[in-house]
Image (cartoon, helix red, strand yellow):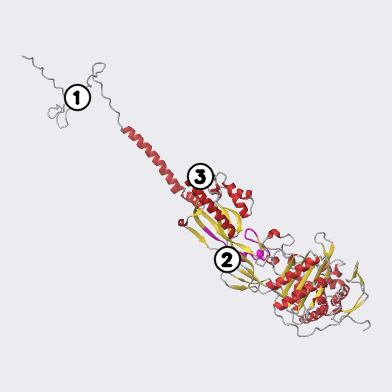
Amino acid sequence: MPPKEPPRRRVPGPAHPRNGANGRSGARPPARRPRPAPGRTTARGRAPRTLRLGSARPRLRLVSLGLTLVMLLFVARLLQVQAVDATAYAAKAEKNRYLEYTVAAERGEITDRKGVALATSVDAHNITADPKLFTPEESKAPDAPQQAAALLAPILGKDVDEIVKKLSTPKSRYTVLAYRQTPQVWKQIKDLKAVLAEKALKDERDGGTGANVLAGVLQEPTTKRVYPNGDLAAGILGFVSADGKGGGGLESQLDEELAGEDGKIRYAQSGGRRVPTAGGSEIPAVPGSDIELTIDRDIQWAAQKAISDQVAKSKADRGYVIVQNTRTGELLAMANAPGYDPNDLSQATAASLGNAALQDVYEPGSTSKVMSIAAVLEEGAATPGTHVTVPNRLHRGDRLFKDDVDHPTWYLTLNGVLAKSSNIGTILATGQLGETQAESNQVLHDYLRKFGLGKKTGLGYPGESPGLLAPPKDWSTSQQYTIPFGQGLSINAVQAASVYSTVANGGVRIAPTLVRGTKGADGRYTPADAPEETRVVREKTAKTLAAMLESVVDDQEGTGTKAAIPGYRVAGKTGTANRVDPVRGVYKGYTASFAGFAPADDPQITVYCAIQNPTKGSYFGGQICGPIYKQVMEFALKTLQVPPSGSKPPRLPVSFKPGE
């Protein structure tokens, strides 16, 4: 019989939660160790022990802590960018994204008295660039500034190195390559940009860099100043500099009124192109006021042509012609020769720039005698028929005075002294203004001042000279006798014309004017302020003096016969003065001049002409300026439709016979 199997020994296991400690009820069977695989035993002949992994919780905590720290850094940075430094970063972003440029206001026109444009503005473009777009990173070309400059320089007429320098400042987002270029110039650049952009796109598709060296070239709409009549009235108008500011003449004097107020445009850009959906802002420009001058374009043309032709013919340094309305003081023409074209200042010389008719000062010579004779008449020291015996030489002070020609003793009336332009006769006449020479000097000085000498004309023109008129106490021994006939003092051409307009206007000086009125951006026209008026001599004296001036032109013994105009009574005076060389400061050459008004019986227009240092042909005022006076006066009378004189000149006596 087989042996009995011994009873199995029960090993107590852990108590089930639902049972007591004895584990009798519902006890789990004891855990069994895994059996070794068949054929595998340990060194000791037992199955290998099972390896247990460590807990994952510490690792998870460590990873969570790291992620938390990273997130905290992101949050802190986000708070710094969006809260603490938000304004600074936003401003930086705006600066890099948005471009802002000035919209130049349209400069007001300058017109003549009839509304004909003398200076106007046309559309133009400022060629600008964004230097950042020329960096290697943005342009994708290592030498973008050099390539762009080589393309732009011939179009803009600029130096290559100058353009390279402007494009090589990446910290700047804006630079101007050229001001006020024509639409044709911008079209050339725009077409070139389009070609390069197409080429860059094709290159990029083929795997290249797609570089476009002109992507950063932009433009701003602006205006360019043009002068439709070329050099006509350039001395009056002046010019506009490259930055759009008045650089001379009325363009400078009235710059604030003409310029208007610039506007601003701000827009987003990307890659040198405007982003239309990104918004922007615009402050519109306010155009400048239009200026209407007293100048008549046609009369200005006639005056300028006449003086230019004579200056060239006489090989003179320069000359001026002034045309003035005797009743209003308005200047109808102010011509200078040589002149310049403000459209092309590169051809202008330093001597031609400016307005010589107001800026040059010179000794007027015999045209100044009208003031001396006016003082004599007004003070009652003599009348037109007063006898004046004129020797060939007159000793006064430290000098021996003479007339422009040698002559036997002349027996002239005071009218004849003016008609024959006698220096000696004028000295003798003005010597009667006071009981002593000092008193005579003071009286004459007072009249010269009232006629406008030694002070500016009132035009307010930039660079105008008031001339030179010393106080009587400072007159030298010779000046006491030379000033009465126009040497030893200096004036400008407008002052000289104003003297004759004063006589023509019945003895009332009206300050010269150039501006007739302005029209603002709202279209409202504002007339200029009325000019200042000053009574210089009585109307009776002025009329007597006008009759005496007719003898200069009408009488065969007068010096101004070449200024006679058929059908019109003409009053005028010649002048031939020694000229002070402005460089050496000594007398060299002559100043020839002629001044007068017409019709003498109903004065309306004054014309004054002066030519500096004529070196070919005659240098006498009556010979070279008299014909200019006639030419310009005839044109002005016809242009203004002034009817011919209806009476004959008085023909006052010029001389007397001894013993009468």
Q: Secondary structure at mark 3?
A: loop
Relative image position of residue 419 (x, y in whole percent) = 84, 77
The disc placed on residue 32 is: 1
Q: CA distance from mark 3 to mark 1?
A: 73 Å
- Which of the two discs, 2 and 1, labels the residue nearer the N terminus? 1
Quarter of the rendering containing residue 328:
bottom right
Query: In the displayed structure, would residue 589 be above or below residue 384?
Result: above
**Dot 1 amino acid type:** Arg
Neighbour class for label 1 at 10 Å: few (<14), some, many (≥20)? few
Q: CA distance from mark 3 to mark 2?
A: 46 Å
**Dot 2 amino acid type:** Pro
Q: Which residues are magenta?
A: 241-265
Q: Dot 3 corresponds to which residue?
A: 209
- Which of the two discs, 3 and 1, labels the residue nearer the N terminus? 1
Q: Secondary structure at mark 1?
A: loop
Query: In the displayed structure, would residue 313 be above or below residue 141?
Result: below
Residue placed most toward the observer, 650 or 615: 615
Q: Name the front one of labels 3 and 1.
A: 3
